[in-house]
Image (cartoon, rainbow, N blue to C red):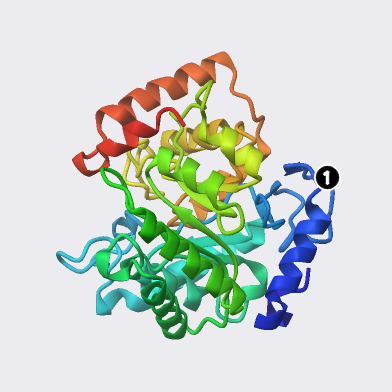
Amino acid sequence: MKSNESISRREFLGDAALVAAGLAASSTQVGRAATPPKILNFNANMEYRRLGKTGLMISCICLGGHWKRLDATIPGLFKKGGGWMEVTDECKAAFDQNRSEIVSRCIDAGINYVDACAGHEIMAYSRALKGRREKMYLGFSWYEKESRFPEWRTAKKLLQGIEEGMRDAGLDYVDLWRISALTEGSQHSANEVEEMISALATAKKQGKVRFTGVSSHDRDWLKIMVEKYPEQIQVILTPYTANSKVLPTDSLFDAVKQCDVGVLGIKPFASNSLFKGDSTLASPDAEEDSRRARLAIRYILANPALTAPMPGLINAGQVDNVVKAVQERRQLDQSERTELDKANAETWAKLPADYQWLKKWEYV
């Protein structure tokens, strides 16, 4: 594959087809001993997995877009009432430096995919990747201008949204556009789904995006999408925690494997409910929380149908820790399994009210 710097929009479709054809026969997982030439930002200490029919080989740990808890490291980071995404003017320089340093650490470790799922995230990671887009694939979802909101449910509006987002972020192309669908409790109408699929197909045809997919918190809906729209649903994003288990029958992963769809797992640490401390390096619980994170990553990676979990990482120590998990023995022994079960029980007991829905993803 050509480096991203040398890929023009007109070449996207051709390159995508070549990559898929060249890698179709490759195994789901590439060991750390090999040095396949088609792996972006290859590092011998990282493991790479095939992202379904896209043919892309991506690191088995990816960088999630969130930076929750970063205010514990950068006091005064978040605007009052603005949530964890909105950064105060006084802290913008420190924030950008943090994101740039995290991206650099990931690149050094061979992590080659970052996923941004909101306008603030797209802007932040576009800045952090400036001058080095050839090192990482970029996943794009400006969810505020996508199908979670009624006014953005036509193909015309969805295409307007991605065009505006790419313009504002200074992006010439997007590696993966995955539209954020309704979360849970309601589903899109058949017409809304067709509009979504039309927008994905058009954006790909126009050369704005290389690959397409959707993200959702609705397991049944994702299964339908995977099976019904094989051309446009190349990748899905779905919750998958250290307490998730594959259903013995009618699993989402049955459809994923049959349709050769890449799966990126969100919420691997259950929105940080897995941890005891505040995620700072100085926390008295830092050592235990690091161990819990590695146990969770090892457990999740034991499912070969899931391409990669995407933890939100806020300091270099966290990057190093998840990379260490990749290098550790994959299967948990009985004592480790008992330890993780205890941590999972504590996680479920303290899930905040707005994350109770995550319990629905115990069986996938």
Question: Residue most toward the left?
Answer: 81
**Above-or-below relation of 48 to 163:** above
Snapshot quadrant of residue 253 = top right
Front residue (pair 157, 240): 157
What SS does tag 1 mark? loop
**Above-or-below relation of 359 to 312:** above
The residue sitting at 40% across, 72% down in the picture is: 158
Question: Residue most toward the top?
Answer: 334
Q: How many marks?
A: 1
What residue type is disc 1 on? Ala
Measuring from the top left, give residue 49's x and y in whole percent.
69, 47
- Name the residue that disc number 1 marks: 33
Measuring from the top left, give residue 179's x and y in whole percent.
44, 61
Measuring from the top left, give residue 38's x and y in whole percent.
80, 61
Q: Quadrant of the N terminus?
A: bottom right
Snapshot quadrant of residue 241 = top left
The residue sitting at 53% across, 20% down in the picture is: 248
The residue sitting at 68% across, 53% down in the picture is: 53
**Above-or-below relation of 335 to 364:** above
The residue sitting at 51% across, 19% down in the picture is: 337
Q: Is residue 334 in sight in this rendering?
A: yes
Question: Residue most toward the front?
Answer: 191
Q: Is residue 321 in sight in this rendering?
A: no
Callout 1 crowding tier (Cα within 10 Å): few <14, some 14–19, many ≥20: few
Measuring from the top left, give residue 300's x and y in whole percent.
54, 35
